[in-house]
Amino acid sequence: MSVSPGGLPEPRPRPRSGNLREVAEEIEAATGLRAQIMGGKLVMSPTPGGKHAGVVRRLRRQLEDGVLPEGLDMYEVSSIALPDDPDDYVTPDLVVLPTEWEEDDDWLADPEDTALAVEVISQSEKSREIRDKADWYAVARVPVLLVVDPRKGTWSLHTRPDNGAYQEVVPGKFGESVRLPDPLGVEILTDGFPVYGRSPRGPERQKGPFTERSQ
């Protein structure tokens, strides 16, 4: 959906999905892992750990308490598709969308409707994977991307997507606040965000996202 200048939602037709997306959906249903298709590649991620979930919870509470602009709200487990390509999509940890999203029967949101995407880096993600994901959001022209990295206790705010890359990236450390640009205008406090350590339970889990199949 989109929001017209008059404020009324205008549904956008979405192309039909292809085989790779069907495979991703089947794997998610069978394994519980998160499936995403980035640049035509099927990427699987393990279930986030407790500290990952804790960062997401803290972010969500602040965004909700920070009074988002009227007509926008915060959602989890909502995927964003590339424009005109539902077979290429990602699922951010948090995403700010028009509240009309709650009335949509589809599970893929349009990037043009996305005011903010938030990615909390998993414990085993690699630098290349993080760069590829940021580039994906820039290609999709998501206007604001907040990347929080509990591995290093840092964050980065990406804005002004153009030519497949964000033209402005502001870095920071836990303890420094993040000021989201207008029209969001919310200040995120990062004091107390947990930093990853080694899990005390059993063997190490699957080492980060991995490519299963490509188009």
Image (spheres, rainbow, N blue to C red):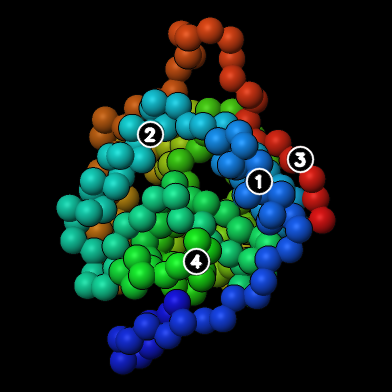
Q: Is there a contact, CB below 8 Å, between mark 3 and mark 2?
A: no
Q: Whole-Å distance between the Cαs marked 3 and 4? A: 25 Å
The circle on residue 53 is 2
The circle on residue 26 is 1
Q: Which of label 2 and label 1 is nearer to you? A: 1
Q: Which residue is mark 4?
A: 106
On screen, residue 108 versus residue 213, left or right, reads left
Q: Whole-Å distance between the Cαs marked 4 and 2? A: 25 Å
Give the mark nearest the N terminus, 2 or 1.
1
On screen, residue 17 versus residue 160, left or right, reads right
Locate residue 87: give its quadrant: bottom right
Kindly tell me whether residue 152 is visible in this rendering: no
Q: Label 1's element?
A: helix
Q: Is there a contact, CB below 8 Å, between mark 1 and mark 3?
A: no
- The residue type indicated by label 1 comes to Glu
Q: Whole-Å distance between the Cαs marked 2 and 1? A: 24 Å
Q: Label 2's element?
A: helix
Q: Which of label 1 and label 3 is nearer to you? A: 1
Q: Residue furthest bottom?
A: 6
Q: Residue at x 51, y 70 (%)?
A: 110
Kindly tell me whether residue 55 is visible in this rendering: yes
Q: Whole-Å distance between the Cαs marked 1 and 4? A: 17 Å
- The residue type indicated by label 4 comes to Asp
Q: Residue at x 49, y 14 (%)?
A: 198
Give the mark nearest the N terminus, 1 or 3.
1
Give the mark nearest the N terminus, 4 or 2.
2
**Is 145 placed above or below 62 here?**
below
Q: Residue at x 33, y 32 (%)?
A: 54
The circle on residue 212 is 3
- The residue type indicated by label 2 comes to Ala
**Residue 184 in picture, x, y percent from top left:** 29, 66
